[in-house]
Amino acid sequence: MNIIFKKSNDDLQKHPGMLLVDNLLNDFDFSLFNLLSNKTENKRWIPNSSVIKSSIFLQCFAMSDFQNIKEMCKDSLFTTLIGCSLSPETYRLRMDLLAKEKNITQLIDSLTVNILKKCKFNTTTINDEEYYTIDIDVTPFENPNVNKEGISCTYKKIDGYAPIMAYLCQYALCFDLRPGNQHSEKGAVDFLNRILKMVDNIGIPMNKILVRVDSAHDDAKFTDACLEKHVKFIIKRNHRKETYTEIISEMRSNISPILSKHGNHRYYFCCKKDIVPTNAKEHDLYVAFKLKEKVEKNSLIQYLSDKDRPCELISYWTNIDIIDNKKSKIFFKTAQECDKLYREHATSEQYHSELKNDMNMELLPSKYFATNKLFLHIATVSFNVLRIIGDHAIKNDRNFQHHKKESTIRIRLRTVIDKICTIAYKIVHHARKLFIKFGKNAFFYETFVKIYRATS
């Protein structure tokens, strides 16, 4: 077969998802970015709003390099939506200038809040009470063999950054970049106060918040901050220098422990702690223990306790009322429920994976720490936009439902990018109208149109 290659004059593109992204951003006043101090009277000056929108568009297509703006500017739809054309050099320079602005963080947080107000959250129910979970975690961004500000050895013994992430249910609440060698708890209280302020602006009451963190945040200041804001929390305990024998004796010497036994010799204890890691003595804190006997010799948790201990021990701090035989409170019936709720915190690791792999955000573009911090902060908005598009896709197209499950809660961001945001289309200008034409074999065309109408 003789194959002949020919270049036509048709305006063929592959990023129609920009229309969906632009729809979700329409009701936010981007002109606020133009009021920042770097504005000049130069008529050729590209507005800050165009630079921020360009970053969101790039990230929504898993493009995390300044050079990618050259490819996007060849799309006439892209230049129409941002109102100008950008070169990689100009884009890099403008991001560096925006990173120095004092109010840029507050503006991005406001944009995130505006997006989250449109979302339907998957809440967690504890005995007929609904809670909005906030999962806070630190994950390393591996950037080996590069010369960038803030790069240092992470806890995984690889050079990179150590950003702290916060997720409100299945959505991103805030991403904050930090040097690789920074301890997880350093700055965590300020970060907690910042995200709780955002949640309050969304309109969620503090007494309906459940904060879940790992043992790196087992600190008196962090616990005090949670108690002062009247939020519920589950904090995995750091046993530090406590020996296995001391913890077991503390559990068994409690006056009225609540004990439940589950399969494989698992025991769950709940007790009230008299000496708590906090100065707020008027609050009741509980300790939930999980004790699993007959741990295998080669288990990964061998180093946590005494060498010859016969079991695995995990415990948590919580201020959610645990049922007591005397007081008959109705929240946590056993420590098993507390352990189950904390294990759901591991879902945030999947969100990390979506950010780093699906959106390609692990290798940040700039050599300057402040610019990378701004770029990652903007990724909070991009993450949520893709998640909302995915939620609409599940609602409008049964092809996204898994055949082995009754209902799919969410789909990965890479699926959203590949199947919805990246579809071949043709741009036609006719009679002062813009036509977006899809091919006859565009499988998700109807889904795309339904999402566009739903987000308009």
Image (cartoon, helix red, strand yellow):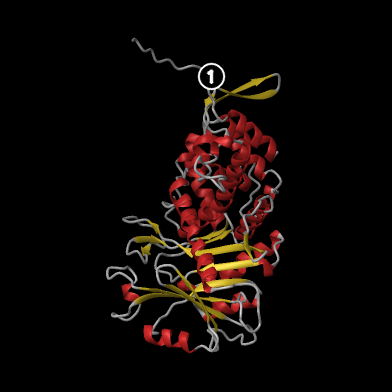
**Residue lying at 63% horizontally and 60% vertically, measured from the top left:** 106
Please determine whether, in this image, residue 355 is positioned above or below residue 192. Answer: above
**Residue lying at 42% horizontally and 55% vertically, measured from the top left:** 367
Q: As drawn, which residue projects farthest toward the top?
A: 2
Note whether residue 83 is visible: no
Q: In which quadrant of the rendered view does residue 291 lie?
A: bottom left
Note whether residue 321 is visible: yes
Kind of residue at disc 1: Asp
**Residue lying at 66% horizontally and 25% vertically, measured from the top left:** 434
In the rendered image, residue 142, in percent from the top left (x then y), is placed at: 37, 57
Give the quarter of the figure containing the C terminus. Answer: top right
- Compared across the picture, whether 2 is left or right of 455 comes to left
Q: Which residue is mark 1?
A: 10
Provide the secondary structure element on which disc 1 rests: loop
* 273 and 10: which is toward the camera: 273
* 252 and 305: which is toward the camera: 252
In the rendered image, residue 193, in percent from the top left (x then y), is placed at: 61, 70
Please determine whether, in this image, residue 227 is positioned above or below residue 445. Answer: below
How many tags in the picture?
A: 1
Please determine whether, in this image, residue 221 is positioned above or below residue 134. Answer: below
Give the quarter of the figure containing the N terminus. Answer: top left
Q: In which quadrant of the rendered view does residue 160 lie?
A: bottom left
In the rendered image, residue 42, in percent from the top left (x then y), is placed at: 63, 44
In the rendered image, residue 210, in percent from the top left (x then y), is placed at: 60, 67
- Residue density around tag 1, few if under 14, some if 14–19, many if 20 or more, within 10 Å: few
**Residue lying at 57% horizontally and 45% vertically, measured from the top left:** 407
* 369 and 403: which is toward the camera: 403
